[in-house]
Image (cartoon, rainbow, N blue to C red):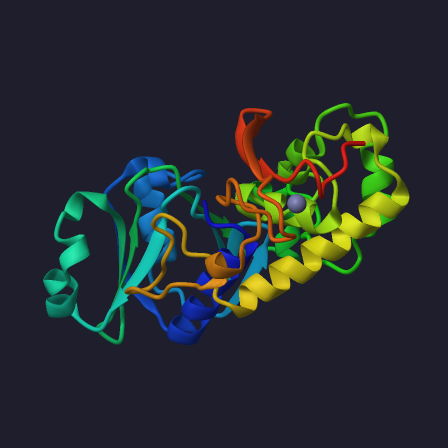
Amino acid sequence: MPEAPEVQNVIAYLQQELTGAMIEKCTITYPGLCSNLSVEQFEHDIAGEHFRSFYRLGKYIVIELDDKDLVSHLRMEGKFLIFNNRAEFEAVDPIKDGKHIHAEFDLSDGRILCYRDTRKFGRLSLYEKVKDWRTLPALEKVGKDALDESLTANDLFEAVKKRKAPIKNILLDQSLIAGIGNIYADEILFEAGISPKSAASHLSLEDWQRILNAARRILAEAMRCGGSTIRSFSYGTGHAGSYQDQLKVHGKEGKCQNGGTDVVYTRVGQRGTWYCPKCQIEK
Ligand SMILES: [Zn+2]
């Protein structure tokens, strides 16, 4: 699943390609894609709108149009693809199986933006424009973004004081801190030197400061590298990231960067987890 760095790179791509473009016509072929409107309403309401501004909150993409706000979550496999014209759209190999194209946006300049999702978990929500997009219903349960500087270690420390869940699960809870998924949670806890199995309630304020610092450094560096391309993450037509080359524990069973051979694979709260019991202390 794309996490904050991958989503940020998708946004940069969409922003560069789409800012100012107008949606002439929209066709939704998988009704489940529209989370808050009927297909007919969605197609009707979005026609004639221009792409204005792009934002990210956690793993969500927020797009301000003229009179509407569009919110997208890619979930496991959602991808936006842009083609210069219909001939190009129909000629490109990976999308010949049209069944995975769930939305097609015909732009007034002749280009085609499409949304493809082999797993069908991704969602699009369309709302009347609001003053502050953070108040949109699709985002109301989402906490502050990991890179939001107004989020402090103390906020997190206070919020989970009484929670016995393992810290790994807490980092994946998007209502507490948004944007971290399974890959970066493992990397963040390795850098912070804390075992993913540690009970959240056992962490000190200093532990939280180390976790937050590690999260910000790792997410920012991964964004700079275009994200991590693991399994099938890519965006546009074949853009891919390179941060997977810098991963230290996730997927690295048996080889710790600090010299040992101790990285183990286990499950923490049902999620596959890699960590080094020697470098990461259980609290
Ligand atoms: Zn180690």
Residue 43 in percent (x, y) is at 31, 50
Query: Is residue 146 among what the camera can see?
Result: yes
Quick check: 195 left or right of 228?
Answer: right
The quadrant of the picture showing ligand 1 is top right
Rendered view: 107 above or below 37: below
Residue drawn where x is 47% and y is 60% of the image: 245
Q: Could you say which is closer to the camera, residue 119 or residue 104?
A: 119
Picture quarter containing residue 181? top right
In the picture, which quadrant includes the C terminus?
top right
Q: How many marks overall?
A: 0
Residue 196 in percent (x, y) is at 67, 35
Quick check: 6 left or right of 96?
Answer: right
Residue 271 in percent (x, y) is at 53, 30
Query: Is residue 67 among what the camera can see?
Result: no
Picture quarter containing residue 165? top right
Q: Could you say which is closer to the camera, residue 145 or residue 223?
A: 223
Farthest residue, direction front: 260
Q: Could you say which is closer to the camera, residue 154 or residue 108?
A: 154
Residue drawn where x is 14% and y is 67% of the image: 86
Quick check: 136 left or right of 72?
Answer: right
Rendered view: 224 above or below 95: below
Residue 134 in percent (x, y) is at 65, 52
Picture quarter containing residue 88? bottom left
Residue drawn where x is 45% and y is 44% of the image: 1
